[in-house]
Amino acid sequence: MMDLLNRLRLKNKPLYYFGGFNLIFSFGCLLMMLFDDTQILGINAWIKPMKFLLTTGIFSFSMAWYLPELEKPTTSRIYSYVIVFILALENSIIIYQAWNGTTSHFNISSPLNGMLFGIMGIAIITLTIWTAYICFLFFRKKDFNAPMTYIWGIRLGLLFFVIFSLEGGMMVNLMQHTVGASDGGKGLFFVNWSRQNGDLRVAHFFGMHSLQILPLTGYFLCKTNRQIMLLATLYFLIVTALLVQAINGIPLF
C-alpha cells in the first residue's frame, strides 16, 4: 500500500495531497456525527459532507493516476489545480451549510443560500467542461505506453463521467433529486437513496464512478479492446436503465 501511495505522490503531488486531505476530513465528519445529532432531510447533517469528501478523494486519486498517461504536464498541472480549487470550494460550502443545519443543494431559501448554490453550480459546470477536454485529449492521443484495454477504460470512464455529470441539470430543473415526492424520508443506508420513489442520484453515482470501474476492468479483466468496449456498453445501458427507472418514479429497491 505504501508503495502504491508513493507512486501516486510522484505522479501528481497536488491531487495526491488534496485527495488525502479530503479522505482525512471525511473521517472528521464521522466524528462530528458522534457529537452532533442535527438532522437535515431526515439524516444526520454530516453524512452528506462525508460522502462528498470521500468522492472527492477518490476522484482526485483517480485523476492523479490517469493524467500522466497524456504526457501533457502543463495541461495536467492546470487541470489538477482546477480540481483542487473547485472541489475545495464546493466541499467548503457543503460543510458550511451542514454546520448551519440546512441543505446546500437546491437551497434558495435566502439570498445567501441561493448565491452559494449558484456558485456551486458554476463551479461544477466549469469542472465538467475541463474534464470533457481531458477526455477529448485521451481520445485524440494515439500512442500510449499502458495497455490499450486500460486506456479505453479511462477514455470511456471519462466520457460516462461527463455524461452523467450533466444529469445534475435534471436535478436542478426539478430543484430536487427525488421523482414523485419531496426530498427526504427513509432511504438506503448511508447513500440515503429513496426507498419509496425514484432517485436521480442512483444513475448519477454509478455513471460518475465508471471513472474508476471501467479502467480497473480494462486493466485487470479485459484482454482485448473489444471486450472493454462491450463491457462499457453494457455498463452504460444498465446505468441508463437506472436513470429511466428513476425518471418514472421507481426506487432502486
Image (cartoon, rainbow, N blue to C red):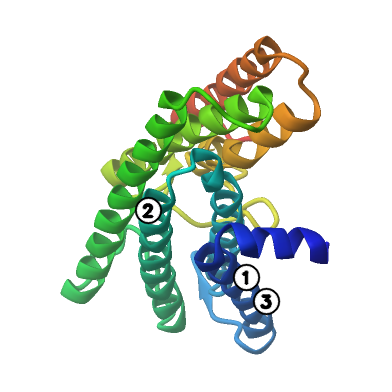
Amino acid on which disc 2 is placed: Thr
Q: Which mark is residue 37?
A: none
Amino acid on which disc 1 is placed: Gly
Q: Which residue is mark 1?
A: 20
**Position of 190 compared to 166: left or right?**
right
Percent position of residue 65, x then y: 61, 50
Percent position of residue 66, x then y: 57, 44
Amino acid on which disc 3 is placed: Phe
Percent position of residue 88, x then y: 42, 70
Q: Which residue is mark 3?
A: 27
Disc 2 vs disc 1: Cβ atoms closer than 8 Å?
A: no
Give whichever of discs 2 and 1 has the lower sequence position. 1
Depth order, front residue of 66/117: 66
Q: Callout 1: helix, strand or loop?
A: helix
Q: Which residue is mark 2?
A: 74
**Position of 131 compared to 191: left or right?**
left
